[in-house]
Amino acid sequence: MFVGDRMSKDLITAGPEMTIFDAQKLMVEKGIRHLPVIDGAGKLIGIVSDRDMRDCMPSTLLKKPDYDITLGKIGNHPIGDIMTKNPMAIYAYYTLQDTLLVMQQRKVGALPVIDEEGYLKGILSTRDLLRAFVNIMNIDEPGSLLCIQVKEQRGQMKKIVDIITEENISLGSVLVARFWDKDKRAIFPYLLTNNVINVKKKLLQAGFELIDPMEWYLDQLPKKTA
Amino acid sequence: MKRTGFVYDDRYLLHDTGGYHPESPERLKAIHQRLSASGVLEKLTLIEADRANQRWIETVHNIHYIMRFDEACISGLSEFEHPDNAICRETCDIAFLAVGGVLKAIDLIMKGEIDNAFCAVRPPGHHAEVDKPMGFCYFNNVAIAARYVQKQYGIERVAIIDFDVHHGNGTQHIFDRDASVFYYSIHEHPSFAYPGTGREFEVGIGEGNGYTVNSPVLPGRGDDEYRRLIMQDLVPAVKKFKPEFIILSAGFDAHESDLMSGTSLSTDGYDFVSEVIMNLVNRFTGGRVVSVLEGGYNLDVLPILVENHIKMLAAIK
């Protein structure tokens, strides 16, 4: 659940004096979209994204000779000139949830991870985060999703979890949609089993409603007007 | 009428899943009872199973996996690598017999003693991977059958049609790089149902690209959707592939009254599925088809659906 467990520690970095030519080659070779820039001691001083790189390149609409001439003027500049200086960075003790929120709010594709002295320790990309959440939610394991609609009142989750536990079923994850129909919530337990008959029977007996995805899906479709 | 074989063996009941498991011996008992009460059974050629030679199982499964499975049973464990996969001491032997029953049916078809066959076997198989048991399955009966047809009888193109409500992940993965085995599955959408594979864009890999076709069905949908998908996805693909032998993963858990799934295929809807498949069989394989039981857990409807399916195989009105 912590950034330290999920960040890439195999760091590919550059110094600020690396040329744009070399940096671009490095990023393509290693298949990375974010290149952290560090000083001689290993402290984070900037980051170059593939967008920074594209922004400084000549337009592909230029004719070949013009393109090459312009490229020649650009390629030997140091990346220190195009990097984002003092980029936003996080610490290894950040939770993945918090990082998800930061990435969504700040619209960044990767966050460098530093220690308290500012030394670069890792980098967490949206891909790392996606992989982490797939893994945390256990959805890469075979299983079945239940869709349950509940009244908005205390103790509903307990009843559901009790039924799942009684059936000796291992729970991959549970997502709760707090806003569903009026006064209703929707709970989506992901069960690591094929065997959902008895748990479904018990949920129905306990008065829960199983959501038929087609019902709400059809409600969402634009209605034909006469 | 056709000469239809019926693979059944009392020993299939010995795979004991512990009394509170939907994949129970009662399933086969109910099927057998219904067939004998209705008089359909006496019109079929009864086939008792022989134990499969392990070398055929090894055409699909890793030998270490087979040994692990055998050891888990011998040592008296109650599950094999996941709580879904309930076992008893006899399970491994019975799984050998399930494969053996299917292979024997193929032998009789190839010798011309019967036209086709339904195999009422347990345990089921289509979730079993090369080296992993999954979803009540240990040996992939249909995958081994496809390899057997190819290696023993030199048949090149085999189609597997899987209408169990769950996607046959094992079968798909075993053949997804293989252009000689076509795999079609129609099943409840992976967003909602076990095992979470079988999306429209899973179409085979490398040389096998185009030889896997998946038709996911959203929960709540039934006959119309099955009709549409089978005509749109299955029929043209089989016409193009021109199989010489067809194997069915016959699961009856897509029925509207089977709580294992959210799809609502009716009894008539199942007839439609069987009928289209038999039309394809008659047109392409000279009638050669072996149908192998997978899921189906509502003990009231399972026997009816199996009987109707067998009537389609045997062309009994």
Image: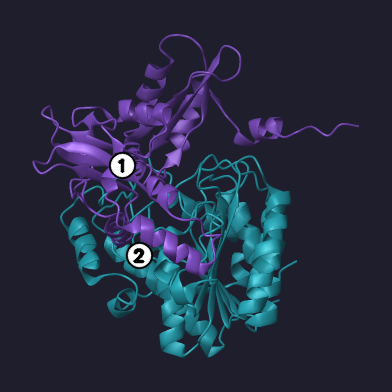
Chain colours: A purple, B cyan
- Residue at the right extreme, as displayed: A226
Q: Residue A32, image x and y in percent?
A: 32, 52
Determine the residue positioned at 47% across, 59% down: B168
Q: Residue B28, image x and y in percent?
A: 47, 55
Determine the residue positioned at 42% across, 88% down: B152
**Above or below, B213 relative to B224:** below
Residue B131 in sight: yes
Amino acid, disc 2? Phe
Q: Chain of mark 2?
A: B
| Residue named by callout 2 | B139
Q: Residue A112, image x and y in percent?
A: 25, 37
Give the SS element for disc 1. Answer: loop
Mark 1 packing: few (<14 Cα in 10 Å), some, or many (20+)?
many
Tell me the quadrant of the picture where the N terminus of chain A can be found.
top left
Determine the residue positioned at 49% across, 44% down: B193
Tell me the quadrant of the picture where the C terminus of chain A can be found.
top right
**Above or below, A25 relative to B192:** below
Q: Nearer the viewer, residue B256 or A131?
A: A131
Q: Nearer the viewer, residue A220 or B278?
A: A220
Q: Is residue B83 left or right of residue B299?
A: left
| Residue named by callout 1 | A83
Amino acid, disc 1? Met
* Badge 2 vs badge 1, beta-carbon distance below 8 Å: no
Q: Is residue B67 left or right of residue B257?
A: left
Which marked residue is nearer to the observer: mark 2 or mark 1?
A: 1
Q: Is residue B315 left or right of residue B70?
A: right
Query: Do circles 2 and 1 both sit on a common chain?
Result: no
